[in-house]
Image: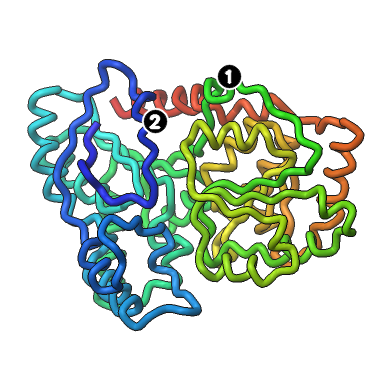
Amino acid sequence: MLTVEKGNYPSIDYDLINEIPVGCKVYRTKIFEPFELYSKITGKSTGEKIPTFVLNSSQHEKLSEKLSKKLRANLFVPDAKIGWIKHIVKEGEKIIAREKPDLIFSSSPPHSLQIGAMKLAQKTGLKWMADFRDPWSTAFWQNDIRRMKLAKNRDSKYEKAVLQKADAVSSVSKSIVADFENITKNNFHVLPNGYDYEDFDNITPSTSKKFIISYTGTLSKTQRIDNFLESLVKLNASLLENVEVNFYGTLHPDISASIQKSNIAGIINIHEGVAHKKIIEILMNSDMLLLVIPDTPKNEGILTGKLFEYLASRKPILGIGPKHGEAAEILTTTGCGEMFDFNEDLLPFILNEIEQKNKSVKRNFIDSEIEKFSRKNLAQNLTNIFEELL
């Protein structure tokens, strides 16, 4: 495993280090990142975490923030981690000479690492598989990036080169793979995110009289929850006082402002990000889980990692997003929930789930479909691709 030391991340969960198997060697390199410069320009304190939606515009954005984002978008292509590429190649060659691996597997974002992996594969002649947990040029956050033509062309050139030169390419959804196929032809595979059964072992859900709705992870500006808030407002007072909504993670300032302006701010709690183990407990202690797909073009293929742990918890999922997208399809085939459009009334669904809890009625989950997304099964699929390459 080749990664960075002291990298800048939106959040860090040190407990996950314990999941690295004994015998797995982890090599860490230096990296140059522009976040210290960004912090100085924008007046943020040193060490303050930079959220994933840093390039999203905001209603109350300062001039210094606008300037820093413009510089970032046009000077750091494809992303702010380009300072790692040379270290990937330099350290990667040493590791390959020492460990004699059979192939290179690179997983992004950040997509800069794919450029480093490409150069490493060219230098060593090893088979190389490039894996994308997020899209590249069609990613929804690209809509807010004010890039000049030169920077756009450079980004597209990098993307095409990686997709063409890899011996195999995988991504999380059929839609992202289809977008890649529009750029070039290659050996493409769909390899979604998943969940670990073991994470859910020995967790006994607590009981609460309140109906608890939870959301975990980041909420960007385009992950609109207007109809969710409006639907909750319609609940009669006796029901509303027994509802509790919890957001765990970082919210875009515009989303936070919408919550504060709503008439139900009193039942909504916003928590900082918590350790992964705690997240699993939160899911198991919830009565409904909220899933929000970004309201952007080409959002049908967005499959967030949280979806699969939501499935494993076997709690009803209220989805907001494209009704004909891949996330909606998974909710239907697993029996875990329903997807609603961004302007659709969610009140009937919420009322039904509150009633089901009060009557102790359990949803009919389709276990065989949920189990397709266990990481054990997905790892076997990945192994099959490796064996084909070799």
The correct choice, above or below, for 255 with respect to 367 in the image is: below
Q: Nearer the viewer, residue 68 or 384?
A: 68
Q: Which mark identifies residue 15?
A: 2
Mark 1 = which residue?
A: 201
Instruction: Name above or below for residue 380 compared with residue 233.
Output: above
Crowd tier of the residue under label 2, counting other residues whose Cα lies within 10 Å: few below 14, some 14–19, many 20 or above: few
Q: Residue at x 31, y 52 (%)?
A: 111
User: What is the spatial separation of the Cα atoms under label 2 and label 1, in whole angstroms?
Assistant: 16 Å
List x then y, in percent, for residue 329. Answer: 68, 45
Which residue occupies the foreground of this view, 357 or 348? 357
Q: Is residue 227 visible?
A: yes
**Rendered-image quadrant of the C terminus:** top left
Relative placement, left or right, of 161 versus 361 is left
Upstream in sequence: badge 2 or badge 1: 2
Q: Can you give x and y, in whole percent of width and height, for residue 11 in the image?
A: 39, 47
Name which residue type carries label 2: Asp
